[in-house]
Image (cartoon, rainbow, N blue to C red):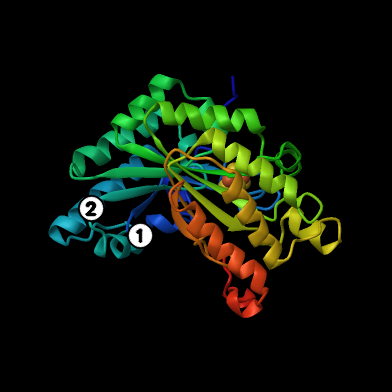
């Protein structure tokens, strides 16, 4: 049984709205913060490392939902509502909501249900709600609770799986091992919640590169998600991994080695039906396709780049992003 992390409840005035950090595929969503930060703030590579988790009062979240409704339906601005609500509401098509922040699924269940019920009541045409989630968040929910969330249209979880290599998971302080990650993901799938998982090229460093790639192919196979995305390790100042790299304790792989890892993952992972992509701005080269059917075509693109070894074919360093 997973223990519930210490939740910092704050009053309405002191809840700090987080910056918008969201998956690329959520570009059309309205971003509704119910937390700020991440409850598992220990991952040594992450920009949430060491952050303070804040939990937004339900009344405040509901006030924002009501203000959004007034704005999109009648063009009315409600006093004391941040301008970002109107900026986001202006281009919103009313179909998707993304719950912020780093693991909004940590929000206490009765409060989460209340917010979701209210969103559904006010926006009945809503098609889906999604959130980042940690394996720990999922493991501490019962199967019935996850099914209830699915009923309330919370039906996509974005999960940072990062690696299938036990050593890597331990070193980056992910807080769960291979088996726990797979169990959590399967539990969400059993509740009918779609999974979009991400893995990080380069997380094993030079020494552990091949093992990281092979073991990550293994965990992707065991999870069998609907969506999978590969990111490339980017060093974030202030994180332990950044310091390790600076001190030479962590040796970073080259851009071409990251594509070699990507090739190994695609070659060795088996999926039922997965949209796999490396479109994220951190990557040196983008491939995407539906697996298994597009496997050969994706591998062909990677082999071409790896054989040519031409840096001009890769995304330049200055255009890479988090
Ligand atoms: S990787 Fe995910 S779980 Fe880890 S600190 Fe970052 S947001 Fe939290």
The residue at the far bottom in this view is 312
Front residue (pair 291, 125): 291
Q: Quadrant of the C terminus?
A: bottom right
Q: CA distance from mark 2 to mark 1?
A: 19 Å
Residue 205 quadrant: bottom right
Front residue (pair 307, 126): 307
Q: Is residue 113 above or below residue 197?
A: above
Q: Identify the residue under disc 1.
A: 82
Classify residue 166 as left or right of residue 97: right
Q: Is residue 116 visible?
A: yes
Residue 178 percent location from the top left of the image:
65, 33
Q: Residue at x 29, y 30 (%)?
A: 151
Classify residue 30 as left or right of residue 235: left
Q: Quadrant of the N terminus?
A: top right
Report helix, strand or loop for mark 2.
loop
Classify residue 88 as left or right of residue 245: left
Q: Identify the residue under disc 2.
A: 94
């Amino acid at each position: 049984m997973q223990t519930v992390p210490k939740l910092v409840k704050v009053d309405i005035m002191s809840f700090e709205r987080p910056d918008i950090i969201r998956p690329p595929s959520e570009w059309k969503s309205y971003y509704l913060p119910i937390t700020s930060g991440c409850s598992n703030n220990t991952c040594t590579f992450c920009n949430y490392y060491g952050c303070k988790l804040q939990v937004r009062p339900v009344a405040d979240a509901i006030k924002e939902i009501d203000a959004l409704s007034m704005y999109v339906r009648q063009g009315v601005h409600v006093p004391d509502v941040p301008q970002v609500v109107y900026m986001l509401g202006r281009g919103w098509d009313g179909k998707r909501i993304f719950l912020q922040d780093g693991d909004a699924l940590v929000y206490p269940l009765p409060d989460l249900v209340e917010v979701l019920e209210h969103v559904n009541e006010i926006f009945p045409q809503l098609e889906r709600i999604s959130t980042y989630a940690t394996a720990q968040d999922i493991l501490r929910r019962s199967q019935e609770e996850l099914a209830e969330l699915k009923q309330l249209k919370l039906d996509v979880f974005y999960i940072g799986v990062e690696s299938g290599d036990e050593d890597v998971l331990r070193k980056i302080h992910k807080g769960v091992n291979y088996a726990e990650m797979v169990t959590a993901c399967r539990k969400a799938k059993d509740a009918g919640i779609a999974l979009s998982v991400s893995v990080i090229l380069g997380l094993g460093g030079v020494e552990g590169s091949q093992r990281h790639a092979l073991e990550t192919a293994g965990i992707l196979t065991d999870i069998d998600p609907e969506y999978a995305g590969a990111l490339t390790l980017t060093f974030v100042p202030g994180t332990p991994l950044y310091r390790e790299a600076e001190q030479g304790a962590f040796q970073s792989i080259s851009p071409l080695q990251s594509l070699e890892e990507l090739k190994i993952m695609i070659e060795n992972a088996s999926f039922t039906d997965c949209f796999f992509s490396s479109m994220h701005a951190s990557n040196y080269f983008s491939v995407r396709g539906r697996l298994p059917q597009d496997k050969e075509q994706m591998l062909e693109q990677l082999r071409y780049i790896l054989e040519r070894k031409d840096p001009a074919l890769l995304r330049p360093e200055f255009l890479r992003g988090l």
